[in-house]
Amino acid sequence: MRGYLHSLVMWGTDLTVENIVMNGQNKSIRTTLANAIRAIRATKHIVPMWIDAMSINQDDIPERGRQVQRMGQIYDNALKVYSYLGQPYDDFALAFSFVEELRKHPVIRFNQHGDFHFGMENEDNRITPEQLPRMCAALYNVLTKQYFRRAWILQEIAWATSPTVLSDSKLAIQYGDLDMAAYHLHDLLARDPALISQIEHADPSISKVSTHMLAYPRKVFYFRYLLSRGDENVLPFHKFKNDSPGYLEVLVLTRDFECTDPVDRIFALWNLAQDKAGLKFTPSYENTFEEAYADFTRAWSVQHGILDILGAVEMTPQSRDFYERSPSWCPNWNAAATAGCLVRKDYLPTRFMSALGDQEGKLYSADGDVEQGAPVPWFTFEANALHCTGLILDEIAIVCDDAPDIPAGTAPKSTWRFHHWMDVLRTHYQKHELGTYDDPLRAVWAMFHGDSIAAWPPVAESGYDPQTYRSSEPYVCLPALSRHVLPFAGSFNHTEAWSVVDTVLRGRRPFVTKNGYMGLSPAYISEPHKDDEPHTWQLAIVMGCSVPLVLRERGDGTYQLVGSCFVQGWMDGEWLETMMGAESAKDFWEALGDGAKMVIT
């Protein structure tokens, strides 16, 4: 059926219900939903409306599973899709007017007074410095509504026809304009961190301004932009792969989104993923979410012939109950990520959506970037045991403590950690006279940006004009070699580079291995618990997995997967030559054969 409206209603804790008449029958629904219907309905015409909570029999488990697979078609066939944000608060109109103003200014520059200037350079500033914090606060309140953190709206908006944000006051705005506003607000906060405290002062109800919260609405629109192949009211600069976005990319990017039923961490993304051909997995609400996660992990790994999904495992204390019932190689998608992801990007760069390509593909190639070509599979799943090919190369010797006494202020805590840990590692390498790296400081600098050493040469070796770079930064980025820092005006943007540091260091601690390598481990392995015995954290490279893994040996000779890590000097497969003397990754792994089998349970 075509020619209906689709309503997406804001989540909330208000469980108040009221009675309505639907198709001639009395029905009890939440007041929030009733308000949404009143805001959307036409005054002169009768238009059919699809509302998931009412149009799908929520008590029929098989029907719910079937509907999951056709939701993309339902949204695509709608005349219009409305996102209802609820009753307006005092600054709702101010936020919407700010969005309209931002839409007119692709670039916002500083003027001669050091203020952000809205409008042409020779014109008066359309938003004064006194007005800006209040307008930013109003917009921040809209963009950080819980609605934008719902997992289900990702595919709903991606496939929707003309998705529009709506309030009770009939104020409406297109999603493309809202994304542009979110980009601008993030950009303003990154360029002038003092604006953060000004926003908090302008609206005391905002306890803490976090740029991470602005990622939610941007990700919502990103998938719409991606599925339209860039043709969403913008001029695309990139070509997109037909199978983009992939399921793992979607799972990683949306891991912090919310849903009521844990299985929907996977099912709510079904119509976003475009690489499902050959995936032997069917959404079903008849199994437990632990069973669904394990079945999906097996199916995805076999479908792609690689084990990158293992890099999404986080065996945090919060996931202990999950891993008492599930194998350690299965990511717990029901727990928000605590650390920056290494197997796929878990963030969107602060750029116009039209300037973004798809964020697809692996970031590293620690296994040497070998491709499945042998007639015998690299790995097999036997019940809850993963049989794979891998090597224990090293073990963690020390993990750095967190930076002490992080001062309050506008600078990100990651900046403070960057400098503190830089000094700690420099001192350690000097004290122990470790010769693992020619320039340990450069190795640390690159690692804290998520890069191999070659991406961050000294200024004198970079080819850049030394006069244009800060003396406090001894190394500069070559974006062509960087995993995260994008090109900007012939080189790179320093503000963006520091944002990368914040992403890379999130939830991680530096470590040094027994053989003198430095790396970044999940912070949770450095936090002992009263029922824990001392453990040796072993670092492994598994064939088919693009990042090093942290393992713990069990008493029966199998291994428990604890998480993933960055090891400087391993991420591009350099260890194959430096530690093994191998010239070819493919030949090396084939020569090992059964001599490097391991079992992860």
Image (cartoon, rainbow, N blue to C red):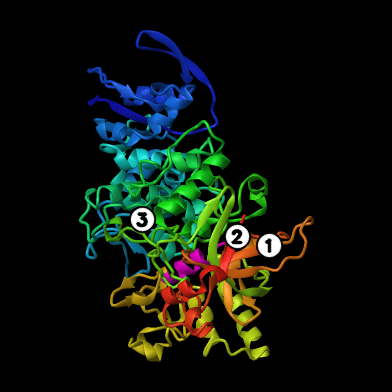
Q: Sequence-wise, which precedes: disc 1 or disc 3?
A: 3
Secondary structure category for the residue under label 1: loop
Which quadrant holds the N terminus? top left
Predominant SS of the magenta segment:
helix
Q: In this view of the protein, can residue 197 be seen by the observer?
A: no
Q: Residues within 10 Å of mark 1 (few under 14, many from 20)?
A: few
Question: Amino acid type of disc 3?
Answer: Tyr
Query: Can you name the residue that lies furthest to the top here?
Result: 24
Q: Which residue is mark 1?
A: 557
Q: Amino acid at mark 2?
A: Val
Compared across the picture, whether 359 is left or right of 525 comes to left
Q: Which residues are magenta?
A: 497-509
Residue visible at 52% across and 41% down? Answer: 292
Q: Which residue is mark 2?
A: 599
Q: CA distance from mark 2 to mark 1?
A: 8 Å
Compare marks 2 and 1 and give the one earlier in the sequence: 1
Question: Residue under circle 3?
Answer: 183
Amino acid residing under circle 1: Gly
Say how many tags the image has: 3
